[in-house]
Image (cartoon, helix red, strand yellow):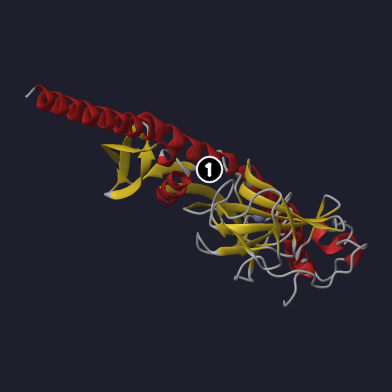
Amino acid sequence: MLSTIRFIFFTVFTIALIFSAVLVTVLNTYKPAVKAYLNGKFVGYFSDEQQFDEVYNDLVAEKQSIDPNVKVYLDYEPTFETSYVRDSVIADQNVYTNLRAEVKTEYTIYNVAVNGEKKMTFNTKDEANKYASSLKKEVSKLKTEVKVEKVSELGEMTSIERADSILKDIVDRNKPVETPKATVNNRTYVQTAASIGPSSVAATGSGVWPTVNRRVNCAFMGYAGHTGIDLGGPIGTAIYAYRSGTVTFAGWGSGYGLHIKINHGDGMTTYYAHCSKLLVKVGQKVSEGQKIAEIGMTGYTTGPHVHFEVRLNGVPVNPYPYIQGK
Ligand SMILES: [Zn+2]
């Protein structure tokens, strides 16, 4: 009788011990969290509602760093459900990707129209007014006006070099025939970095396209300070190593977002920016055409694309002449 009681006691005790060990492990691994939804669509796990606001505010700040006047909003109020999840999924990369896809933006852009036709687009009123008034002054017979437009995506803005050449073109086309050429052409135009190109390396294809899309959305120096080329593609599209080399950076950087740098030797490095996912690590050797990342919208970008840079001894050069199979 006594041994039976003792047996039952020890069995119950052992079960209780195992149960509490499991409980402690589960409590350490799983954390209380909230599941956030927008219009019934799952966005991600957050430690609390306040963290959702913090992530959202990060994304607002990111958009505002491109254009401080952008209106950023969500179409729906978030709803939350309490839940227990693994610590590692709380406010992870997917949260940013999912939420970024839901964030709506409204940019105000200013078009300079000549006789009703859009000629230049700026994101500041001052710049648009400046070119509109120069045009009015030089070609008064044309109807020049600034038109305000609201757009959900910030498209390509007219660079100063481009605006100057459009202005010159309009002035040239509309000049009175008796005007001597010299007075019209006495402006000087700065050669853009894109047309200079490097001289030390033969500009014949030496690497592969970094993604399947071969259409350049924004060219090298397409706007002041644009040190690479932009190739669009849906989020998740493969990004390939341009040549074989060693990964020297794989992580987050302001502006570039999630990005990778590869050293190819001979002073050449390449950059792949705004990724949604990185598939390689620092120090890893990669081969030409190897999938290294996926297209995303991290960092300063208004749409999913890979920003691809070629640097020779640290200096960004136009990558286009260095790509095979154009
Ligand atoms: Zn770019």
Note whether residue 245 is visible.
yes
Residue 212: percent from left, percent from top: 60, 71
Residue 258 versus residue 144 in the image, above or below: above
Q: Residue at x 45, y 36 (%)?
A: 55
In the image, taking residue 184 as reference, residue 119 lies left or right, namely left
The residue wearing badge 1 is 63
How many marks can you see? 1
Q: In the picture, which quadrant includes the C terminus? A: bottom right
Label 1 SS = helix
At label 1, the amino acid type is Lys
In the image, taking residue 173 as reference, residue 37 lies left or right, namely left
Front residue (pair 182, 319):
319
Ligand 1 lies in quarter: bottom right
Q: Residue at x 59, y 52 (%)?
A: 274
In the image, taking residue 320 as reference, residue 3 lies left or right, namely left
Residue 313: percent from left, percent from top: 86, 52
Residue 203 versus residue 25 in the image, above or below: below
- The answer to which quarter of the image holds residue 163 is bottom right
Q: In the picture, which quadrant includes the N terminus? A: top left
Q: Furthest-left residue in view?
A: 1
